[in-house]
Image (cartoon, rainbow, N blue to C red):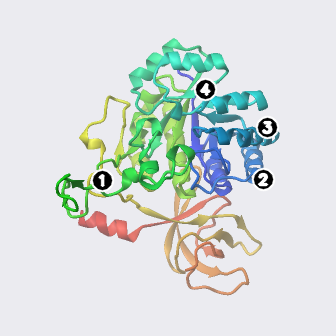
Amino acid sequence: MSMRKVELLVPASSLEVLKTAVIFGADAVYIGGEAFGLRAKAKNFSMEEMAEGIRFAHEHQVKVYVTANILAHNYDLEGARAYFKELKEIGPDALIISDPGMFTIAKEECPEIDIHISTQANNTNYLTYQFWQKQGATRVVSARELSLQEIKEIRAHIPEEMEIESFIHGAMCISYSGRCLLSNYFTGRDANHGACTHPCRWKYAVVEEKRPGEYLPVYENERGTFIFNSKDLCMIEYIPEVLNAGIDSLKIEGRMKTALYVATVARTYRKAIDDYLESEEKYRANMDWYKAEISKCTYRQFTTGFFFGKPDENTQIYDSNTYVNEYIYLGIIEAIDDRRLARIEQKNKFCVGDRIEIMKPDGRNVQTQVLDMFDEEGNHLESCPHSKQVIYLKLSEMPEVYDLLRVENPEQRINNVKG
């Protein structure tokens, strides 16, 4: 099988994160509007922000896909038609849809926009791909339950122009292709309408029918059990296998993640893909860097999911539902002013004198010291304790616009030493 041109597809929860994804190596970005997507708790985009994001991405030769992948009810349809009419005016490169009703409306209202079939549609065989291609879809997102061998078989049975998109990194849902009913059952919030409360991450115990109120332990330690809590998918060590399976778009999960997460994952996979396409030797030689960098954003330990066969007991986390968080996000460089001070909207507290890191899109991590700090009125600050405060920084190394600032998490470092 000849190597297909591959796309790195990165999520964005906001306009700031979209710009970060574009600058840090995405070929395409997927976003959600204020309705009809499956991440209702994400910040999501107004129509004005979506239009600006599409303009910015297109200026950098990056595509934008908009999610409209709810499982629609009757009361959704009229609003969906109006929504697609608005989307037609701002021109995203594709719509991500799972519901045949939503698909029908999209084809009627904006036939010139490509449609990608969401993983929510449970796309597990080549006849499903053939079906959607005949309806007019240009791409199908593979179900997360597929192995690489199954994806290869799909590739061999579908038209050359039909595209396959597959998740290669991020959180894994406990339910089949994300179609979870636990959230609806426990809280009345429908995961398939974008309101998931993530009950797969909650603490559970067993209760015997004739012993109400007696919680029987099914765990290893005193913190409880998290029996539905999957490790995160990570395929950074298997780029050759992924590319040789005939996948067209390598998708990162995380439409509720921070700019630091998106920048870290996008930059690492961008370099891994480019290195491998240059030579496998270069890819192998840089493996330690990829693995070190990919762990510098939040994650729940890593697994290869279903790609090499059905997961076993080692793909779950039983003693915690917390993330590993090795670095803290401080902010993104928005501008450099006439005083050569860097403007940021601060995300977490740090102080004058701190040693921090400038994370650059080209792969470099530059150590720097905070020499001085000012608020918007020009007042000197010793620290910035207020989240989202706009501050101006004098750093020992000059950053550039779109660089990210981060610092090693001292709590995680202490835990690593103890471990």
Mark 3, Cα crowd under 10 Å, few <14 / some 14-19 / many 20+, is some
Q: How far apart are the alpha carbons under marks 4 and 3?
A: 19 Å
At x 26%, y 42%, the residue is 314
Q: Which residue is mark 1?
A: 226
Depth-wise, is mark 4 or mark 3 nearer the camera?
Answer: 3
Distance, label 2 to label 3, CA atoms, is 13 Å
Percent x, y of residue 132? 60, 21
- Give how far across and how far down residue 324 sits, in percent: 37, 58
Asked whether disc 4 touches disc 1, contact meaning CB atoms under 8 Å apart, the reply is no
Dot placed on the residue nearer the N-terminal end, 4 or 3: 3
Callout 4, which amino acid? Arg
The label number, if any, that marks residue 88 in the structure image: 3
Residue for badge 2? 48
Point out which mark residue 336 bears: none
Q: Which x, y percent locates residue 417?
A: 27, 66
State the residue position of label 4: 139
The amino acid on which the numbered mark 1 sits, given as a three-letter code, is Phe
Q: Nearer the viewer, mark 2 or mark 1?
A: 1
Q: Residue at x 49, y 51 (%)?
A: 196
Q: Quadrant of the C terminus?
A: bottom left
Q: Residue at x 41, y 25 (%)?
A: 148
Instruction: Kindly check if marks 4 and 2 are in contact, taking CB atoms under 8 A apart as contact.
Output: no
First reached walking from the N terminus: tag 2 or tag 1: 2
- Alpha carbons under labels 1 and 3: distance apart: 43 Å
